[in-house]
Image (spheres, rainbow, N blue to C red):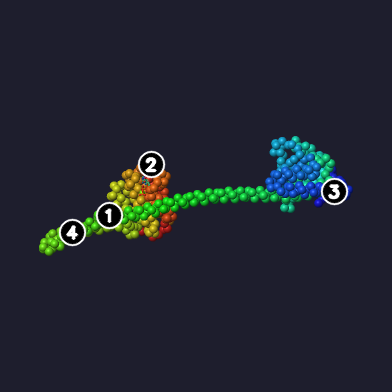
Amino acid sequence: MPEAFSSQTVVDRREAPGRAGGRQRRRLQALYKLAAEVASLRDLQRVLDTALRHCLSLTESQFGFIGLNTADGSAMDVAAIQGFDAMPEFYQRFHLIPLRPNIFARAVLENRPVRSSDAAIDPARVGQPSGHPPVRTFLGVPLRLRGRVAGMIGVANRPSEYSAEDQDLLTAYASHVAIAIQNARLYEELKAAKSDLEEQVAARTSELAEAKEALAQKAAQLQMLLIETVNVQERERERIAHDMHDGVNQLIIGAMLEVKAARERLRSGEREPVERALSQIRSVLGQVDGELKRLIFDLRPPTLDALGLADSITRYAERFLISTGTDCAVRVSGPTRRLPPHVEIGVYRVMQEALNNVALHSGARRVQLSLDFSDGLVQLVVTDDGRGFDVKAGRNGQHLGLLGMRERAERLDGELRIDSNPGVGTCVTLRVPAAPGASV
Ligand SMILES: Nc1ncnc2c1ncn2[C@@H]1O[C@H](COP(=O)(O)OP(=O)(O)OP(=O)(O)O)[C@@H](O)[C@H]1O
Ligand SMILES: [Mg+2]
């Protein structure tokens, strides 16, 4: 390796072979010991500080520094400095050494060791910041990482000038320091990646815990809904049984009695009472027919299959007005069309539950139903001017109507929104995707 030179540069006074050999061996042993110590360190700053201490002791220098090139390659950042007590502000101000061709930066720029017997009068000298002790003897060696110069080690003010052996020793030691720096950087990257990974794992774990909690809540709600559905079915069967018993059954019994009376009168040849009885029977059968239609409508609205959503909702609103006395206006907009049966019944049932709630809880005077068909979407809005309620509080209770509406919306890949405020009224909005189909 060729040496850098300056006018003050070095006379290579290698010592006589015998004595010199023993000294060199001792210094090499010291070097390997120190190299092993620095190689065992993981923290970059400790590597740099320990290495610099070793450099000073190996070369009997008064002070020194380790500079690492900045990312843009325009300067060296003094990563470790030892041998004089600089004020922190001094370091703050002067920690960047510009990479210009002067005695201190040449080791980096020219990728070779630089020695000077007196830096103060060296032709490549450069002024030093005020507060820096004067540099006399100087030795700088490049730090090579992965075959490229990544910085340097500079030592100064050895009482006698630096020899070629000092230079060889520092160069050899610098290669160990470079490996230790590389290892420490890799270790830091690894540590950062590990903590990043740990953060990601922690975040994912808490997301999973939240999702698990949400699933458990959902499962509990579904369970409640299932139980309630079975109860509702039972209650509905009971109601239909009662209705049939009190309504249809009584009417049929009445009609049978009329038939019996008419037969007796027929035997006695009375024509007119028989005709009266027959017309009575006809009227009773008419009532039976009406009663059965009502029951069938409750089970599954036949209008839905025959007329579609818009007309069925309009008819339901008319019946709602008759049975509750609450004014119920319907507005249908957009290209009205038939939707898949499961969508039509889903929207219809949400409308039913919303109107049930209006009748049971709102005290409203008016309710407005809007059904809007647009491309790929059907929207139902039920707005009442009743007393309203606290939607969040309602969600926690045992009430299943709203929950059931939400479940239906989800099953249809749609969304349900409830806007309500006590004293202001309630607005239930259901939006369901519905591919354009045949217009009605
Ligand atoms: N339109 C409305 N106006 C005022 N309050 C309402 C309205 N809709 C719902 N609520 C309030 O929200 C609560 C929950 O309604 P939800 O339909 O879930 O249950 P419910 O009607 O009480 O019982 P069910 O499970 O039989 O439907 C009601 O008890 C009522 O207090
Ligand atoms: Mg309800």
Structural crowding at the residue carrying mark 1, measured as other residues with C-alpha within 10 Å and reported as few (<14), some (14–19) or many (≥20): few
First along the sequence among labels 3 and 4:
3
The relative height of residue 233 versus residue 43 in the rendered view (above or below) is below
Q: Position of residue 391 (x, y in %)?
A: 41, 45
Per the model, the C-alpha gap separating discs 2 and 3 is 98 Å
Task: Write down the residue under mark 3.
Answer: 22
Amino acid type of the residue tagged 1 in the rendering: His
Structural crowding at the residue carrying mark 4, measured as other residues with C-alpha within 10 Å and reported as few (<14), some (14–19) or many (≥20): some
Q: Residue at x 22, y 57 (%)?
A: 251
In this image, 79 relative to 277: left or right?
A: right
Q: Which element carries disc 3, helix, strand or loop?
A: helix
Per the model, the C-alpha gap separating discs 3 and 1 is 117 Å
First along the sequence among labels 4 and 1:
1
In this image, 196 relative to 126: left or right?
A: left
Task: Write down the residue under mark 1.
Answer: 242
Q: Which element carries disc 2, helix, strand or loop?
A: loop
Per the model, the C-alpha gap separating discs 3 and 4 is 137 Å
In this image, 87 relative to 264: left or right?
A: right
Q: Residue at x 44, y 52 (%)?
A: 219
Q: Residue at x 76, y 39 (%)?
A: 83
Q: Are marks 2 and 4 in contact (CB under 8 Å)?
A: no
Which-is-in-front pick, marks 2 and 4?
Answer: 4
Amino acid type of the residue tagged 4 in the rendering: Leu
Which-is-in-front pick, marks 3 and 4?
Answer: 3
First along the sequence among labels 3 and 1:
3
Q: Which element carries disc 1, helix, strand or loop?
A: helix
Looking at the rendered structure, which numbered label has been put on residue 257?
Answer: 4
Q: Quadrant of the C terminus?
A: bottom left
Task: Write down the residue under mark 2.
Answer: 422
Between 286 and 192, the one nearer to me in the picture: 192
First along the sequence among labels 2 and 3:
3
Query: Is residue 182 at least partly visible in the picture?
Result: yes
